Image (cartoon, rainbow, N blue to C red):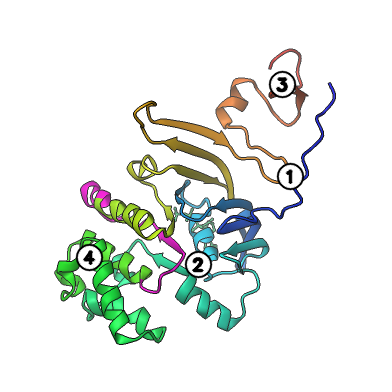
């Protein structure tokens, strides 16, 4: 059959996205081994989205978050957030980027907070460093603690707060300088399921009320089951996405899994599909009117 003409948009990949990862590679070189933590990862996140990143241990989630946080530079490829090219940030641009464009919440609250500062003081700190006026700092800190349901912790130090309260204060700290992107690396990883649900609800509130784009790495199926888009990372690449729609008056909630095709057209077939049809190194492809067929290169198996 004749192939339809390919549409030519002439627009750059991800031109309208807040986060663009284009073929990002990150290789860690140690004395004895080379680890390819990211192996050509593509990812687009649009402004206002809240997405979950999932994947087995060692798949590259934290490496990706560190790149997006401006804490680590890709070995190759392109990463851009809110117009900032993360592959070539100068030292001063890096400071500005980490202070104003992106906020980061780590799994251990102790790494987000300061033991001798109260919640009010620790939320104030990034604004003081950024040179914000006292009145603005005060009202912003109060607003954030209120929004996150921890206004009652304003005068408490971390030891006087529960784990969930500490993480909600950590989110307030990350948001103090109004970043466009909030990154959270397993923010509920050390919490029991009820407290984890409260912290995740706080991230949803931030996304909804402040419009902050949120990328959350999680192992928690209760978290990934609640977001509109879950991106799975396997071996340093985005491998599949689940898109969910919420229930409406006319339609039930849906969840549909998609494979991700990279810009060179590569798609990873799930292992159980490959095994079921004994698809190995070579497969036959055929273009049908509205789908592509993949067949084993041995006889009729399809
Ligand atoms: N600083 C480093 N030096 C060498 N190798 C590293 C370094 N950081 C990460 N790696 C390796 O890179 C790969 C990806 O690690 P990464 O921490 O990004 O995975 P992850 O998906 O976040 O895992 P987890 O869920 O266990 O946190 C792993 O093989 C890891 O051992």
Q: Is residue 69 above or below residue 40?
A: below
Q: Are marks 1 and 4 in contact (CB under 8 Å)?
A: no
Does 18 sit left or right of 249 as displayed? right
Quick check: is 181 in the magenta stretch? yes
**The residue positioned farthest toward the right in the image shown:** 2
Tell me the residue that label 3 is attached to.
Answer: 295
Q: Which residue is mark 4?
A: 146
Q: Is residue 108 left or right of residue 297?
A: left
- According to the picture, the residue beneath numbered tag 2 turns out to be 69
> Where is mark 1, residue-wise?
264
Q: Would you call the spot at circle 3 few (<14 residues within 10 Å), some (14-19), or many (20 or more)?
A: some
Q: Are marks 3 and 1 in contact (CB under 8 Å)?
A: no
Upstream in sequence: badge 3 or badge 4: 4
Q: In the rendering, at what x and y percent does residue 45 appear?
A: 54, 53
Q: Write down the region rendered in magenta.
A: 176-197
Instruction: Label 1, secondary structure: give it.
Output: loop
Within 10 angstroms of label 4, few (less than 14), some, or many (20 or more) residues?
Answer: some
* The image quarter in which residue 104 lies: bottom left
Extreme front residue here? 249
């Amino acid at each position: 059959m004749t192939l339809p003409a390919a549409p030519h948009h002439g627009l750059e990949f991800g031109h309208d996205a807040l986060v663009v990862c284009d073929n990002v590679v990150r290789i860690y070189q140690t004395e004895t081994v080379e680890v390819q933590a990211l192996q050509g990862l593509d990812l687009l996140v649009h402004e206002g989205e809240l997405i979950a990143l999932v994947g087995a241990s060692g798949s590259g989630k934290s490496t990706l978050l560190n790149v997006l946080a401006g804490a680590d530079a890709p070995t190759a490829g392109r990463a851009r957030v809110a117009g900032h090219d993360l592959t070539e940030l100068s030292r001063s641009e890096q400071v500005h980027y980490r202070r104003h464009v992106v906020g980061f919440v780590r799994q251990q609250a102790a790494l987000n907070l300061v033991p001798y500062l109260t919640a009010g003081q620790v939320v104030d700190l990034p604004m003081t460093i950024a040179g914000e006026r006292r009145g603005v700092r005060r009202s912003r800190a109060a607003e954030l603690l209120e929004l996150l349901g921890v206004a009652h912790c304003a005068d408490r130090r971390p030891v006087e707060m529960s784990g969930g309260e500490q993480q909600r204060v950590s989110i307030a700290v990350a948001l103090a300088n109004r970043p466009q992107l909030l990154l959270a690396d397993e923010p509920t990883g050390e919490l029991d399921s009820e407290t984890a649900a409260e912290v995740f609800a706080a991230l949803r509130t931030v996304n909804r009320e402040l419009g902050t784009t949120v990328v959350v790495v999680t192992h928690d199926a209760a978290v990934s089951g609640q977001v509109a888009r879950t991106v799975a990372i396997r071996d340093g690449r985005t491998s599949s996405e689940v898109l969910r729609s919420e229930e409406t008056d006319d339609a039930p909630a849906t969840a549909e899994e998609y494979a991700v095709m990279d810009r060179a057209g590569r798609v990873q077939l799930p292992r159980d599909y490959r095994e079921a049809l004994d698809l190995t190194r070579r497969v036959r492809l055929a273009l049908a009117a509205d789908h592509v067929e993949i067949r084993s290169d041995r006889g009729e198996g399809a």
